[in-house]
Amino acid sequence: MKTAQKGTSIRSKASLTGWAFVGLAVIMIFVFYFYPMFQALLLSFKSGTGMNLDFVGLDNYKRLFTDTTFRTALANTFIYLIIQVPVMIILALFISVLLNNSELKFKGFFRTAIFLPAVTSLVAYSVIFKYLFATDGLINKLLMKIALIQTPIEWITDPFWAKITIIIAITWRWTGYNMIFYLSSLQNIDHSIYEAARIDGASSVRQFFGITIPLLKPIILFTSITSTIGTLQLFDEVVNITKGGPGNATLSISQYIYNLSFKYSSDFGYAATVSYSIVIIIIILAFLQFKLAGDDK
Amino acid sequence: MSKLKKIGMYTFLIVAAFISIFPFLWMITSATNTSADVTKGTILPGSHLFENISNLFATIDIGTALLNSAKVSVTTTVLSLVIASLAGYGFEIYRSKAKDVVFSILLLSMMIPFAAIMIPLFQMFAKISNSAPAIGIDTLSGVILPTVVTAFLIFFFRQNAKMFPRDLLEAGRIDGLSELGLFFRVFLPTMKTTYAAAGIITFMSSWNNYLWPLIVLQSPENQTVPMLISQLGSSYSPDYGIIMTAIVISTIPTALVFFFMQKHFVAGMTGSVK
């Protein structure tokens, strides 16, 4: 927007130098992202085991529409998405507003503590959650000790509770991460805006919805898109906490693609077809989220 | 603020902080207890830490996994920082219409889910294996190569290059530095904080990466730490004391990075979207 180069001779030379700087990175992104993406599209019209694939036209896409396992994985992923992402974003917003309060003491401690889960590896925390939420695990023991429940909850082995466990786990891992984004945006908001609102007699609830939310809109949009993409790619947690079970009750799309490629008698072609469904869903959802947030950017 | 509101606020934050920290505390105390004690539901620290550590190293080859993960993460981080910062700098300092178009195309790659490209990537490396086994399937280079450059990192460096004072470049040119010299002698030293933040993000995601190593690596001697932890976690008769010790050890590198560079870490995460 503002760069004004000095002369034409410098410009053409600078342009060439510039390409030399960006070249390697551009090539690598094309080789390791766009080329595989294109290959996956070609693959989605092929079928067979291992590396022996034949062109089958739209057969894979027909199979997709009658595949009940795919439907289950899709439904599971959407349940995670619809429940987990809004809960987490609201929770993260609420915490960040509390932490932004100028009268709050021990701010640093609270911030670090709540952010801490974001530094753990997905596999490590998943294994810990698997043990904590085992039927004879610590969570059930504690809940029974304080008499909140009489019989242990089957957190991992019941189809309903297993989904809840996955949702609790993801929320634990990512709330602090999103909270940091909101907090740093909140710190950029001029305090005099709130001052003026208070003088006008606006309650803190009205301030939240009237000032905070509108000002944070771009960052809320950013985090909701990244969370959506993240949830659609859910793999580590499901594999390590429930293995996708019981049955296929917690199976995610990414895990199904992995299973199709490397676990069952491998069918790379059909797996690629399933993977394209995620791409299409991401495009649709990102588009919807942009629309929902309005065009004012 | 009313007293009631204050109490509510602190109660909520204390509960949230407790829930966030509790699994860590349990992980650490479990590493000091025997498997039987962990099963019983002990949450207090025990006295079996050293026993667990020696049992862990005696029964499981965690040393190899740690070494593999270290090799992968350090190499990825160094290569990433060099290649992505060169690009971010190039896109911003030598800005042109054509480059801007290429840049926005690169950004689209952030929307590509890894699950959608993992099969073609696997096939690509299987093919590479035939002609160059040293960088193909079941090699650490195979793990590193596709994860080195991300559009996010290029974007991150470009955003930060926007704040870089151009006068310094002019001064360097007058001193007779080459264009590459300007980058290494002027830009790089002034942008230490940016490099620190980018380095932390890359190191952490590389250390914790699970799915791609799981696909590309096959032999046990090439296993990375997350693969090992996952395998331990799915054993049928787990020794909780030993497994928790392994998890604690595997978390130490990222925890250290986090605690010593917390400021850069947060700045790095949020800086690029401001």
Image (cartoon, helix red, strand yellow):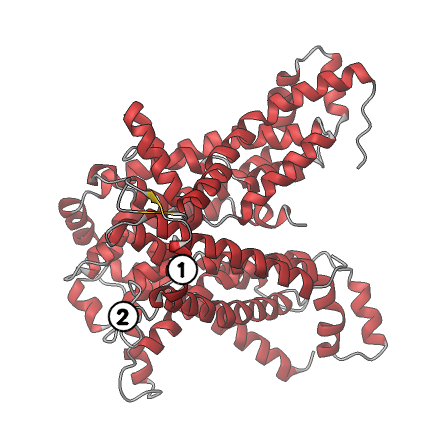
Q: Position of residue B195 (x, y in %)?
A: 56, 35
Image quadrant assignment for residue B87 = top right
Q: Is residue B163 left or right of residue B24?
A: right
Q: Residue placed at 48% from the left, 41% from the top?
A: A38
Q: Which one is nearer the viewer's eye here, B192 or B146? A: B146
Circle 1: residue type:
Lys
- Circle 2 is placed at which residue position? A247
Residue B253 seen in the current view:
no
The image shows residue A277, relative to residue B261, as above or below, that is below
Mark pair 2, 1: CA separation: 24 Å
Q: Which one is nearer the viewer's eye here, A24 or A95? A: A24
Q: Position of residue B226 (x, y in %)?
A: 31, 48
Q: Residue placed at 24% from the left, 70% from the top?
A: B42
Residue sitting farthest toward the top: B176
Q: Is residue B53 left or right of residue A4?
A: left
Quadrant for the N terminus of chain B in the image? bottom right
Q: Is residue A82 left or right of residue B223?
A: right
Q: Residue placed at 43% from the left, 64% from the top?
A: A170
Circle 2: residue type:
Gly
The chain holding disc 2 is A
Q: Which one is nearer the viewer's eye here, A270 or B253? A: A270
Q: Secondary structure at mark 1?
A: helix
- Circle 1 is placed at which residue position? A62
Say whether mark 1 and mark 2 are on the same chain: yes
